[in-house]
DNA sequence: GGTGGATATGCATTTATTAGCATATCGCAA
DNA sequence: TTGCGATATGCTAATAAATGCATATCCACC
């Protein structure tokens, strides 16, 4: 049985976000900051990562501080000065956090994508 | 092997949102609006539902309009006037949409909760 | 035919987010 | 020892989002 939804189904996109929050419900680490951590690590530089993603250095720096304040230890080694001006790299803890979130996220991606397909089928009346 | 994260793990909460968007990426229907639709249906009234959830009538009305504009047909039957002042009830399409999103959401809830537990264990160094 | 209470909608105001500017610090290399 | 480029941080301006009025419309019931 077809439904009125069928005609619109191909225009429906799915989006979702997962994030960690503190006990007051304030966001600590989510998709955006996670991707940023990975890119900083890859580039070895906060500035370079911000330039690539189009984020402001100021804001991203504040985000990193929030995450580290929550955990109570640094996720990034920061180096100032030198020929290159400075650099950043993930600490061991930073690497572990990114790796764990990677796995979490890719598991969630798969399941949510499948659930979305089922959802669209159900809307269309295919079951 | 224990990690520095272990001491903070019990303070990490998980939150996530799933929503449908149009092709421009604008949000159409997400967790909040979905819950609101269900409550309107339950109460038979937009005003009563807003009062209960603490949302403003003005804003919620606009949200409903956005959803219906996207789909091109109504999800709610609206009645004005009468002894009670007016009422709302889900249309057949509205019921189908809520039901499909219900299933989608509960599937996602289960998997994400499990993924989060695994994530915390991984952070703690339990594997 | 007037009342009450909910739907319907515009608009001004307040509040929260984000962007952007300015400026200080650091340390290698020329 | 001076310059360069990135990290570090305060503060203000611009945007976006939500709130809060105000007001009109509708209609069963008395």
Image (cartoon, coloured by chain):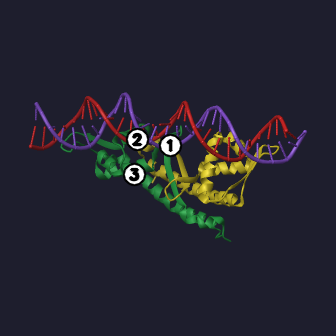
Chain colours: A green, B yellow, C red, D purple
Find the distance from the CA under tag 3 to the CA under tag 1: 17 Å
Q: Are marks 2 and 3 on the same chain?
A: yes
Residue B55 lies, with reference to residue B110, above or below; the image says above
Instruction: Locate residue B30 relative to residue A95 in the image: left or right.
Output: right
In this rendered view, identify the residue nearer to me: A14 or A74: A14
Residue A14 lies, with reference to residue A71, above or below; the image says below
Residue lying at 45% horizontally and 50% vertically, measured from the top left: A31
**Mark 2, secondary structure of its residue:** helix
Residue A101's disc is none
* Mark 2 crowd level (few <14, some 14–19, many ≥20, 10 Å Cα): some
Q: Position of residue C5 (x, y in %)?
A: 77, 39
In this rendered view, identify the residue nearer to me: B91 or A16: B91
Residue A21's disc is 1
**Mark 1, secondary structure of its residue:** strand
**Mark 3, secondary structure of its residue:** helix
Residue lying at 50% horizontally and 53% vertically, measured from the top left: B118
Residue A35's disc is 3
Residue A31 lies, with reference to residue D18, above or below; the image says below
Instruction: Locate residue C12 relative to residue B47 in the image: left or right.
Output: left
The residue to which callout 2 is attached is: A63
* Mark 3 crowd level (few <14, some 14–19, many ≥20, 10 Å Cα): some
Residue lying at 59% horizontally and 50% vertically, measured from the top left: B31
In this rendered view, identify the residue nearer to me: A92 or B69: B69
């Amino acid at each position: 049985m077809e439904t009125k939804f069928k005609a619109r189904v191909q225009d429906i996109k799915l989006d979702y976000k997962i994030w960690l929050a503190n006990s007051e419900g304030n966001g600590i680490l989510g998709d955006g900051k996670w991707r940023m951590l990975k890119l900083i690590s890859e580039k070895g530089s906060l500035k370079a990562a911000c330039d690539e993603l189009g984020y402001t250095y100021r804001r991203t720096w504040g985000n990193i501080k929030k995450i580290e304040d929550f955990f109570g230890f640094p996720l990034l080694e920061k180096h100032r000065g030198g020929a290159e001006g400075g650099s950043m790299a993930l600490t061991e803890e930073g690497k572990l956090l990114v790796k764990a979130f990677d796995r979490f996220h890719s598991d969630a991606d798969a399941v949510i994508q499948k659930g979305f397909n089922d959802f669209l089928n159900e809307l269309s009346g295919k079951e």
